[in-house]
Amino acid sequence: MNDPVANQTLAADAVIVGGGLVGLSMAIALGGAGLAVAVVDREDPAGATNARFDGRATAIALASQRMLAAIGIWRHVSASQPILEIRVADGDSSFFLHYDHRDIGADPLGYMVENRVLRVALYARAAELPGVRLLAPVAVAAVDRGRPGIALGRGTVELADGRKIAAPIVIGADGRNSGLREAAAIRCVSHDYRQIGIVCTVRHELPHRGVAVERFLPSGPFAILPLTENRASLVWTEAAATAPALLALPPAAFAAELGRRFGDHLGALQVVGPRWSYPLSLHLAETYVAARLALIGDAAHVIHPVAGQGLNLGLRDVAALAEVLVDAARLGLDLGQGDVLERYQRWRRFDALALAAVTDGLTRLFSNDAAPLRLARRAGLAAVNALPPAKKFFMRHAMGQVGALPRLLTGNTL
Ligand SMILES: Cc1cc2nc3c(=O)[nH]c(=O)nc-3n(C[C@H](O)[C@H](O)[C@H](O)COP(=O)(O)OP(=O)(O)OC[C@H]3O[C@@H](n4cnc5c(N)ncnc54)[C@H](O)[C@@H]3O)c2cc1C
């Protein structure tokens, strides 16, 4: 007997493999501009918005927030905490690098949003757009990108349930172990930091006043990121060899270890919810495009979370690729054509390379307790702090406001 599902071939302007934070944002940006998009993810959306799926919170730079507002996602974000100041310290040194949003203007430096809150907002916005079709949970079984060089050709994504989706462009948003990247034989430069990011949430006695703190400890950075309701999200980096023992500590001993690193500036602390752990590594795809394929987000680049920029980089990919594809669609061009994809790649590669170099350099420079290095970096932090133009440049960079910005990142629509 014929299986009606298995015989279905859907047609779309773009098919996105991976409906994580980046893939769904991409689908919404394209769908909102009138393109027909299919987005496929193997996770069940009901599970992906559960509090036990992803314990992280993300620092969303101001430019990224403007884009999320421009494509209709931000109004579904039910809770966000403005980041008003960032204080960086080397261990227990009093040399603070201090970023204050008032040095730049009235806007905050960015916003902290819990990932599960962001996912709920993404699903809600995707459901409003008739052009966006979310196929989940279902895995991708095979991808055929057709023969290269054929004008107005199609790539076809085959799902595990037999359905097929045909589109002129396949977008790989399938994360750090991207199957699409591997199938296209795109090589990746990788480095294992041999560090684990321990993530948890604490409730504290005193208000944080929107201040994010980054403390560079010998084992790695310890970030205290303000959340709503007197809570903070912690990203506590430890050597891979010692992290499992910390993660396995009974609650009181874990809280004591955490408290030693956190300090007492916010009064009494209480760990709320589970502890999470993420192995940290660097991955840079050697190219972001191939025949009828563009990689975005972690599929193209994974960086150390020290500067809280991984998702922001991915959202900048979304802004650039959406602009390139929508412009091409308006001109009636083939969306999978080499020139169109090259424009995207030229726009995005330098940003990812530069941030990978900066975050990699920071991690190596600060994860070392040798006395000469310690003195040099303390002098460096103090020097940047005393030099307003340098400070403002770094602030604007962290806010995502440097370089040739795609329209969406300036808050405009496509
Ligand atoms: C501890 C930590 C803290 C961080 N903090 C910040 C921060 O403050 N600010 C910031 O900007 N970034 C931060 N990041 C980085 C950020 O979390 C990532 O860059 C971002 O989540 C990547 O999203 P993505 O959608 O590209 O990939 P993913 O989230 O990995 O999504 C990939 C999706 O593809 C799906 N998929 C994969 N293969 C298939 C298949 N074959 N078929 C169907 N579906 C498939 C998966 O199910 C998944 O949903 C942090 C990272 C870590 C580890």
Image (tube, rainbow, N blue to C red):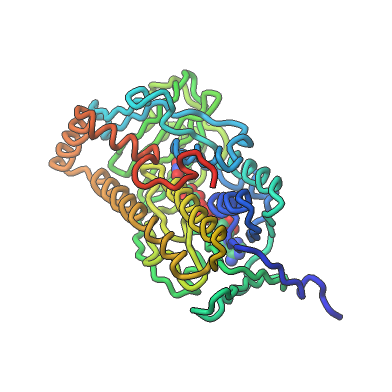
Q: Looking at this view, is 341 or 137 the one in front?
A: 341
Q: Tell me which corner region of the image, top left, top right, bottom left or bottom right, holds residue 272.
A: top right
Residue lying at 68% horizontally and 43% vertically, measured from the top left: 124
Of all residues, the one furthest to the left in this rendering is 372
Report x, y in % for residue 247: 47, 45
Residue 376 falls left or right of residue 173: left
From the viewer's perspective, is residue 383 above or below residue 364?
Answer: above
From the viewer's perspective, is residue 286 above or below residue 55?
Answer: below
Q: Tell me which corner region of the image, top left, top right, bottom left or bottom right, holds residue 263.
A: top left
Report x, y in % for residue 182: 47, 71
Report x, y in % for residue 316: 45, 49
The reply to whether residue 122 is visible in this rendering is: yes
Residue 192 falls left or right of residue 23: left
Report x, y in % for residue 314: 46, 51
Residue lying at 19% horizontally and 38% vertically, measured from the top left: 377
Of all residues, the one furthest to the right in this rendering is 1
The reply to whether residue 143 is visible in this rendering is: no
Residue 130 falls left or right of residue 93: right
Residue lying at 45% horizontally and 35% vertically, measured from the top left: 62
Labels in figure, total: 0
Image quarter in which the N terminus is found:
bottom right
Q: Tell me which corner region of the image, top left, top right, bottom left or bottom right, holds residue 78.
A: top right
From the viewer's perspective, is residue 22 above or below residue 7?
Answer: above
Residue 299 falls left or right of residue 356: right
From the viewer's perspective, is residue 191 above or below residue 2?
Answer: above
